[in-house]
Image (spheres, helix red, strand yellow):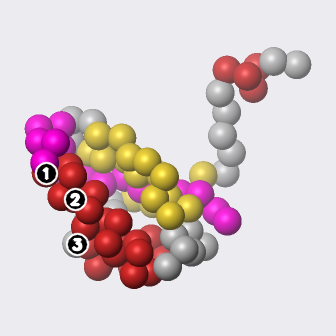
Amino acid sequence: MPKYIIERDIPGASALTPQELQTISQKSCSILNKMGPQIQWLESYVTDNKVYCIYIAPDEATIRAHANQGEFPANHISRIKDVIDPTTAEN
């Protein structure tokens, strides 16, 4: 199943409290549970003004449906084509 990275513009994201992040996460998980196993949230990275989320989903439309139901921004969605890390440099 394809993997995607979602860029969410959230001004002041790094100032969200642990409680606010928990509430957002709970809302997301609740929607994911209703949508079924075809969409999975793997992890997210919070930066100053953005949140980058990694999802597994059959297509971009499924990710947009999740974002719409949760009223989460999904400013840019990109399908991950490959993953590299330091071991990629090894022979």
Q: Label 3 is placed on what type of residue? A: Glu
Please name the residue shown 56% across and 62% down the image: 56
Q: Quadrant of the C terminus?
A: top right
Residue 29 in the image: x percent, y percent?
Answer: 35, 66
| Residue 83 in the image: above or below residue 81 | above
Q: Residues within 10 Å of mark 2 (few under 14, many from 20)?
A: some
Please tell me how many numbered marks the rendered image carries: 3
Residue 46 rendering spot, x and y as whole percentages: 29, 40
Label 3: state its secondary structure.
Answer: loop
Residue 17 in the magenta stretch? The answer is: yes
* Pointer 1 residue: 20
Is 37 left or right of 21, judged from the image as shown? right
Indicate the amino acid at tag 1: Glu
Residue placed under numbered mark 2 in the picture: 24
- Check disc 2 and give the amino acid type: Ile
Mark 3 or 2: in front is 2
Looking at the rendered structure, the secondary structure element under dot 2 is: helix
Contact, CB < 8 Å: mark 2 with mark 1? yes
CA separation in Å, label 1 and label 3: 15 Å
Determine which of the numbered discs, if any, sits on residue 71 in the image. 3
In the image, is residue 28 part of the stretch drawn in magenta?
Answer: no
Residue at the (38%, 46%) spot, across then down: 44
What residue lies at 13% left-to-right and 51% top-to-bottom?
A: 20
Work out whether residue 75 or residue 17 is closer to the camera in this orientation and state it: 17
Q: Please determine whether, in this image, residue 52 is positioned above or below residue 30.
A: above
Q: Can the viewer see residue 59 in this picture?
A: no
Question: Label 3 neighbourhood size at 10 Å, few (<14), some (14-19), many (20+)?
Answer: few
Which segment is the magenta one?
A: 1-19
> Residue sitting at 48 percent across and 52 percent down?
42
- Pointer 3 or 2: first along the chain: 2
Tell me which numbered mark, 1 or 3, is placed earlier along the sequence.
1
